[in-house]
Image: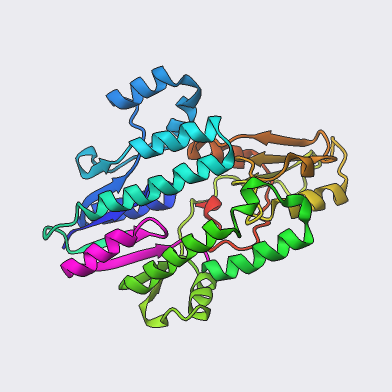
Amino acid sequence: MKGIIANPGVGPHVQQTAMAYHEQQLLHTFYTTLYHQPDAVFSRYFSWFFPFLAKLLSRRTLQNIPPQQVKTFKRFELLRILADKTLLPVATDFVWEWGELAFDNWVSRQINLDIQWVHTYEHCSLSTLKQAKKTGIKSFYEQPSQHFSFFEKIAKDQLKKYPELINLETLLLTDQKSERRNQRREQELNLCDYVICNSTFTKKTLIDAQISAEKIITIPLGFPDAVKNIDKNSTGKTIFIYAGNQSLRKGTHLLYQAWKTCNFKVEEAELWMIGSNQLPLKIREGLGENVKFVHNVPHSELLQLMTKADLLVLPTLCDGFGMVIT
């Protein structure tokens, strides 16, 4: 009883899901956009033509899934990556949405009678779900975060309380484009046979939004074993680490406020901020020299940085699950 999994990205939780299907001999094909194979011709040429993007590509390494079971739809993701490095957020956002819809349409055309189920993800699966329904195939729709109506209220409230957060990227959270995308998500939720979510919190937001509890399956994400015991009697500098996009959703602005209030001396503590920034740079003013910023790194490198830190800071306002620990 084989099926397909389709996601434009290859994040750890997506890879683990695809690997689980493969290990149980349930995976027909994993559809995605762009992934890294160190020995593949594409990866070598990509790194040669775009050396400044080589590290970014390495973050998309796909492991333990046979290449013959992976099909890719590269062109729009390549455009999005280039746009992210060269264009304004509004233009990048346009390319991202264009690519998500094109990816969904492409996956929908791959559905045939050789598969018995599809596993898709929010906002990039409406056409696929329609085709699955038409073909009589069971559909599983993964909802990695809370229902959009829950987040929408928080976003509007935070922008009202902290107008200094307003920029081109944060406005995308509540504008007309956001409303159109949420309507698409609503259609996907109603059309799928089952919704997979990763926490009881996410499940509650779905039920509150009138999604039937009978179609919701809760599967918490796993996480690695502990690799370091912290010496609680240590008198050295305390290292705090934050990993993820610096954004309104992640509550990064509240972490900045808390850090300024603590007013740690340089020899007392450091804060490592790992990930890309989506907030106005002006809100970083006054953080001090003991706050270090590092752009996105490969997952393996992030785990290494975590072993060197003492405390993980997770100020998120509305995530379905702390994926950063997976």
Q: Quadrant of the N terminus?
A: bottom left
Q: Residue at x 59, y 65 (%)?
A: 151
- The residue nearer to you, when weighing 234 against 174, is 174
Q: Residue 211: x, y in percent?
A: 44, 78
The residue closer to the viewer here, 315 or 93, is: 93
Q: Is residue 267 visible?
A: yes
Rendering coords of residue 108 (x, y %): 24, 55
Q: Is residue 211 magenta?
A: no
Which stretch is magenta?
120-146
Seen in the picture, residue 104 relative to 140 is either above or below; the reply is above
Q: Name the spot of residue 10 as percent of width and height, x first.
A: 39, 45
Of all residues, the one furthest to the left in this rendering is: 113
Tell me the colour scheme of the image: rainbow
**The quadrant where residue 154 appears:** bottom right
- Between residue 254 and residue 39, name the one nearer to us: 254
Above or below: residue 297 compared with residue 213:
above
Query: Is residue 141 inside the magenta stretch?
Result: yes
Query: What percent of the width, then of the height, locates residue 31?
Result: 28, 48
**225 displayed left or right of 305:** left
**Residue 9 seen anywhere in this rendered image of the structure:** no
Q: How many marks?
A: 0
